[in-house]
Amino acid sequence: MSKSKELKTNAMRILDKNKIEYKVNYYECGEFIDGVHIADQLGQDYDTSFKTLVTVGKTGNYYVYALPIHKELDLKKAARAVNEKYVEMLHVKDINKATGYIRGGCTPIGMKKQYVTVIHKSAKDCDKIIISGGKLGVQIELAPEDLIKVIGAKYEDIIEE
């Protein structure tokens, strides 16, 4: 199957339905290590390559955060951004059940439910950001404002300094 005939992921179908312009990057992915490894493999800028993290709050609600791949989520800032007393990382074994995605293929677009999503404020300074395409070996490159629009996210400072 040629790259142009690749099957669309749920995230791509949602972007298409919303008439959002995006570019797809395909890459070989044997075993997923982390986003930094993938960016190094593809020669991508860490500041425009975003990872998707899922947390659970004191209330039991799930929250999604997108931040540059080389940064760490500040759990206190993350909790404040969603009006929770605290949030903790969702265990890897629970990611698929909560989101419909697997580790390394988790994207804020098209999860089982549309959870409250926060994107690190540095994305505002980027023309385009790169996020997972919804499965291993697939990335989506799009304008951060389009991502905000399609998933109803907001910008906040959520990383450790």
Image: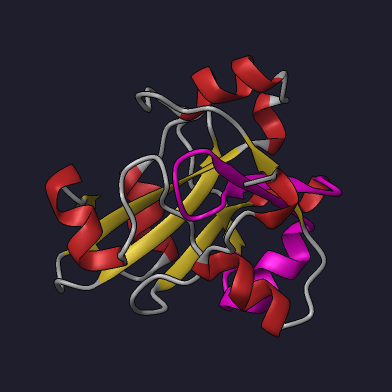
| Above or below for 124 versus 14 | above
Name, please, the residue furthest toward the front.
Answer: 1
| Above or below for 140 versus 26 | below
In this rendered view, identify the residue nearer to me: 127 or 101. 101
Q: Quadrant of residue 145?
A: bottom right
Left or right: 146 as drawn, with respect to 133: right
Q: Position of residue 127 (x, y in %)?
A: 86, 49
In this rendered view, identify the residue nearer to me: 142 or 138. 138
Left or right: 71 as drawn, with respect to 128: left
Part of the protein shown in magenta: 126-154
Q: How is the image coloured?
A: secondary structure
Q: Position of residue 144 (x, y in %)?
A: 73, 58
Magenta segment includes 150? yes
Residue at image position (53%, 63%) is 9
Residue at image position (49%, 62%) is 108
Residue at image position (51%, 50%) is 66
Q: Position of residue 1 (x, y in %)?
A: 62, 47
Q: Is residue 133 visible?
A: yes
Q: Quadrant of residue 136?
A: top left
In this rendered view, identify the residue nearer to me: 15 or 126. 15
Q: Position of residue 83 (x, y in %)?
A: 35, 71
Residue at image position (20%, 51%) is 90
Left or right: 82 as drawn, with respect to 21: left
| Above or below for 35 versus 95 | above
Magenta segment includes 103? no
